[in-house]
Structure formats: structure tokens, C-alpha cells
Image (tube, rainbow, N blue to C red):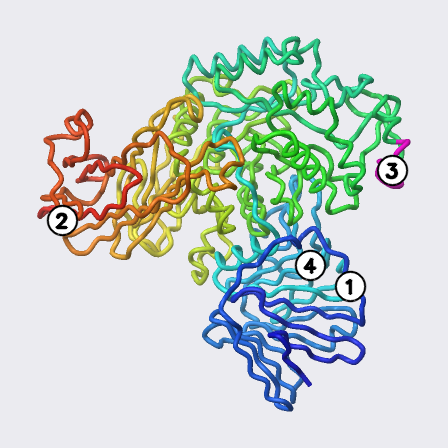
Amino acid sequence: MAHIRDHVMLIGLGTDQLSIRFVAPGIVHVQNTHGDAANAPSLAIDHDAAHPVFEQVRTDANGANGASMTTARASVHWDEQHRQLRIDDAQRRPLLQLDLPSLQHGELTLQHEPQGALYGIGGYNATEDAAAGLLRTGKQVAGAGEQGHAGAPFVWSTAGYGVLLDSDGATFTLKPGAISVDNSTHQHSDYYILIGTPTDIFAALTQLSGRSPLFPKWAMGFTNSQWGIDQKELLQIVDTYRAKHIPIDNFTLDFDWKAWGEDNYGEFRWNATKFPDAPSGKLKSDLDERGIRLTGIMKPRVHVDTVEGRYATAHDLWRPDEKVAPDYFSLKLVKDIDFDKPAARAWFFNDALKQSFATGIAGWWNDEADNTPSNTQFLNMQRTLYDGQRAISNQRVWSVNRNFWLGSQRYAYGLWSGDILTGFASMAGQRARMLSAINVGAMQWGMDGGGFHGHPSDENYARWIEFGAFTPIFRVHGDFGQKRQPWVYGPVAEKAAADAIRLRYLLIPYIYSYEHARRAHGVGLVRPLLFDWPHDPQLRNDVDAWLFGDWLLASPVVEPGQTSKDVYLPAGRWTDWFSGKAYPGGQTVRLAIDSKHWGDIPLFIRDGAIIPTQPPMDYVGEKPLTQLEVDVFPADARTQFDYYDDDGNTYDYEKGAYFAQSLSVQRQGHTVRFGTGAVSGSFKPALKSYLLKIHGGAAATVRSGGTGLPPFQSLDALQHSQGEGWASGHDRYGAVTYVRVMAATVRDIALTLGDNG
């Protein structure tokens, strides 16, 4: 029989006991326990997280007939007669049913409706075929994997549920109507059922596995990575970017920055021959003046016949059972540090590395920690650097890493897709890799733009930059001696690439607001279309397009010589970013593609969009942002955008030093209402005003709080005035009303549109 005690349902299973409780209205925690035996905590779950208090669970214990527990989002039912445990959604639709006999055999089996599509568990490495797309069937091993793979003990369905194991590894078997799990790292099953829409499920995943800290604001920009460089070339490249006004914020250095192979902590300190001004900090100062941050590669291995190698030997810091082998770059003997050992983590962020950080290494590119049996080696490598940097600095941590295991996101963790080939086929395959990684919680994803192995054609390079501009981490990289600067690929590719980079920088205020949204709500800048249209069969396995924030749909060109492209637009109304042409959703549209100049990017604006932009800048924060331009596309339903800002560099936002203000809009016949909400946070940005560009009609009157705002003859006149006001005009989207209002104030603005609205 089932008993409910303190809102926990307890079911006897012979010598075992099943406990079921709600940890949130849409999260059910199910544990199978045996006596006093307890599972060791896994890194996939943030066991230190405090769960918010929620409305009391309603319970009903009916003795011999069973028992139930209910919240506003879900319910759990125990049928004593049939010995079945069922989990339903808020509408009492059955989602999952637990097969109790499977628990007695060390497995977990959950029954579900056979037509449900399943996602998650794992992505793709750099070389495997990604043609299966996003759907997951059959036997699936949940592991961190190698070379760009992302993994999690997590499977979910657009039918309204997810299953998250408290485990650092497992094997899933997915059959029509059933999810089975075995080979968990835990002896007794311990899992969570997450209930709701895809965004609900990922919010719950974040609550359980841990929130991600914010990346620095400069990381929203463009990164040039290069293997084979010295100080002189670095400065020449940076100065060329600046002279051409092609925006860039970060230059990432490969082996070159290190004294690799030298004694006395050569893996952790500057190569003074290649970078003579780096150890003193002068190079950092020179690049600070140019608005450039440096990030550097880190390896998990240490040379054994060195001071640091002998220390690792004496303190047993090596990976177990790993043999000494020659390093492919230094040709000297090396072994890997075991980052799963607390002592290794405590030592690795040593005095030499602290000095490198102090003199200019502002971020970490962690490479080659993915060739061990441990799912948590890469996680713990970045955990080492995150904890080490936070112990000595308030400067935000940034990293990219070559695989992902759920829980990594807690340590300022980005993923890149590994050492990929160049060429259009490889580029096209990155779409499934990105969206599959996001489907297991790796929201901060990037790739070696241009491909790592080989030299891309000029067209391939241009199209790759356009693709990269609409990914979370925007970077280029190549093999030894390869250059990935836009001007290397000829004037046509340079213009197309530079325009794409500038478009990225135009959108920095929009992008950075989703940096905060990811931390707060679990869903970041990029997500598959099925997140927002989970019941559209056209999107069940679509990788050709994705949402970039809530309001933009991107579908970059990934085929050579293409003269047209078909793009499926989900339900709603969509406007082409570049042409201004509007399309009803729920259909496939055919776009003409420029096969000679490569400068077009299929990019659509969703009806209801609120998109803040900034003036042209060569790097993030080059100029104070005093006026935020906001493109607004009113819809019949009220829509909202939460604008967010902070100092972009420190963790003071954790103490409330941020600026957040909601912007909302709704069209009702010939009236458009735009609202600005109350400000939260103590940060005071340079921002003084919003310049709203409200598309879809020219206003006859504009009122704020019942008082008319002063009209101006033109946008130019409005811009040269002081204070608030409005003007009408035309742009590529048609009639537009420009309204300037003060930021950081609560306003209710009503536009009465003229006959053309």
C-alpha cells in the first residue's frame, strides 16, 4: 500500500521503497531506496541548489484504492489494485506510467504514448553522420563523448515531459511507447519527471542541474582564433580589423602563447620569445587600448620530466592507468592530469597560471580532455579554472570546451563542435550538432568557423561567417598556419563576412538580454523551432532554421552556388529582415539567393517582435550606449521583451547590480499600445532614452499617460531635439512611427494610427 507522509508518497517494493515527491509544481522526484543505502551525488545535478517554495501539494490517500498528489502543473496517481504509478499533466492527460517490476531488475521503464517524439540524451561528434537530426530512437548511450559531443542523462518529448536521471552516465533504450534506462552510475534509480512545454522543461532542467553564470559581454561579439602566430602578427591582424572597421572583441591563441615543453611550469606561462611584451603585462595594455581580449588554449596534460610533472607524480594527480606518451607538438613525454581528483583541481590553477591571467589571458580554451572514460573530466577541468579565477578575481570567466556533460554549465562553460572539416557539407552538418547540443542543455555552443581541417573556398568562408553570426558563440579557427581573417578570402567574401559581423554587433543589446534569459529561465539565444511550435509536424526534425532569441528566425545558406532556398515558416506572420516583405506562416517560402556576392542571409522577424539594437561599434562597449533603438512589430496579442544590461565584466549582477526593464506592445485595431515596465536592479547604465521604431503604420497622434507627445516633421528633426517626441516616416518595412521616450521610467504610450495603419 501507498502512504503519504509530509507530502511524500511512499510505496513498498519488498525490501525496497519508492518515494515520490514534488520539488516544484512541474517537477516530480522519484527515488528507489534500499534500507539506508544512499547514492553518491552526481555532477549532473546541482545538489546545493535551493528550490523555491511553491503552493502546497494537494494529497488524497484512499487506503486500499491508492493515493494521489496534485499541483497546479501535474498530478501523480498510485493505483493500488493494478500496482501502477501514473504521472499526468495539468489537464489530467496521462504522460508516463512507471513499470514497477523493472525496478526489481535494476532497470527503469516508463510507458508513454507510442507516437511521442523523443529528444536529448546526446549530440554528435565532429566526424559522425548527423543525418538523424534531432530525433532519438533505439539504444542511446548518455555520455560526454569526444570531439564536440554533448551528453546528458536526460530525454524529453514535445508531448509534455522530460526524464532526468541523477547519474553521471546511463544507457537509454527508446522504443515506441517506452523509455528504458539501465547502466546508470547509481545502484538505485533516482530520477526526475519534468512536465510542461519545452521551455517549461528546460527551465526545470536548469533548476535541477544548475544555472549558468553570465559570460562577459565581449563574448557576445566575434572571436578570431589562430594556431601559428606571434606578437608582431597578432598586433598587425588586430590593427587591420580596426582599420577596416570590422568588429572583433577576442583573439584566441593556440599553443603559441605557452612556453610549451619548457620546465618550470611552461604549460602555464607565456612564451616570452613569441610574445616578448606579454609577461610584463605590456601586451595586455596595448590590446586593452584596442578593445581586444586575449584567450588562450589549455591542455589537460603536463610534461612529466619537469617541476610540475614531478609534483603531479609525487601527489598522484595523473589519470589512473594512463601511460606516458610523447606529445605531438613538443615531442616530449606527457600525461593527463585527473581533474576528477579534488587535489588536482586545487593545484592546477597555480601561481604561474595566475600570473598569465593577470597579464592578459582573459578566457580559457580547454582542449583534448575528452579522450578518457570519464564523463566529467572536461567538466572538472573547467570547474578548476572557474573556481580558480573566481577565487582571485571578480572578472567573469569564459571558456570553450570540446565536449559537454550536463552540469558543466555551472562553470561558465561553452562547447565547440571539435576539429571539423572545412567545406559546405561539414558546415551544413553543424546545424544538427548545434541544435542537438542545445537539446541536452548545452546552450552556449560554437564552432570553428571556416572549418578546422583544410582551407575553405571564398564562398564557403563567407557563408560560414553568416552562419556563425547566428550562433551563441561566434568564432573562427583553423589548423596550424591557417588564417581566418575576412580579407584573406578576397573582396567579395570580405564584404559579405564583414557585413554579417556588423549585423551581429548591431544586435548586441538583443543578444546580451538573452544571455541573462538563459541564466534566469534556462533557454538561451538559440533554440530549435520545435520549442515554440511543439505540435507542428513540419518541425519535428527540422535543423534548417532556428530561433535566434524570441523574435528572429535564421536559416543560413549552407550549399554552394545556391540561387534559391526554400524556408519553412511556422504559424504566425513573418517579415524578411532585409527586404521587408511579409509572409503568412505555416508555409514554405522560396527565396532568391545571390550566388555571386554571397551577402544575403535568410532572416525573418516574427510578428510581435521587440528588437533592441545599437549603433555601429568596432568592439563591445567602444562607445557608451545612451540611446537604444528598438524595432517594434506590433501583433494582436500582447508581446514582451525583457531588456537587460549590467557592467558586462564582473559578477556584481549576482548582488543586484543590473538594469532590467520590460518592454511590451499590442495592436488593437487602429491603436498600438507600447509599455515600459518598472526597472529592477541597482545598475545605472549610460542609457537615457529609447528610440522606438513602431512598424505597421504612421501615427496620427501619440500620447503618453493621456498627454500628447510633441510631433516632429521628420526623424532627423526628432533626433536633433531634446526630450521626448515622435515623427512619422518610411523604411524598408513600410510606414513607421518613431517615438522617443526616456528610459528607466514607467510609461504607457498609445499610438492612434492614420488611415494607412
Which type of secondary structure does the marked residue at label 2 adopt? Answer: loop
- Is 180 left, or right, of 15 in this rendering? left
Between the C-alphas of marks 3 and 4, the distance is 28 Å
The first of marks 3 and 2 along the sequence is: 3
Work out whether mark 3 precedes mark 4 in sequence or the reverse, and give the earlier one.
Answer: 4
Which circle marks residue 728 in the picture? none
- In the rendered view, does 491 fall on the left or right side of 121? left
Residue 401, placed above or below residue 16: above
* Residue corresponding to mark 1: 38
For badge 3, the amino acid type reads: Glu
Q: Which residue is at 56% across, 77% downward?
A: 69
Q: Amino acid at mark 1?
A: Ala
Relative image position of residue 170 (x, y in whole percent)? 72, 58
The residue wearing badge 2 is 706
Q: Is residue 317 one of those drawn in magenta?
A: yes
Label 4 to label 2, Cα distance in Å? 55 Å
Badge 3: residue crowd in 10 Å (few <14, some 14–19, many ≥20): few
**Distance of mark 4 from mark 1, alpha carbons?**
12 Å
Q: Which stretch appears magenta? A: 313-322
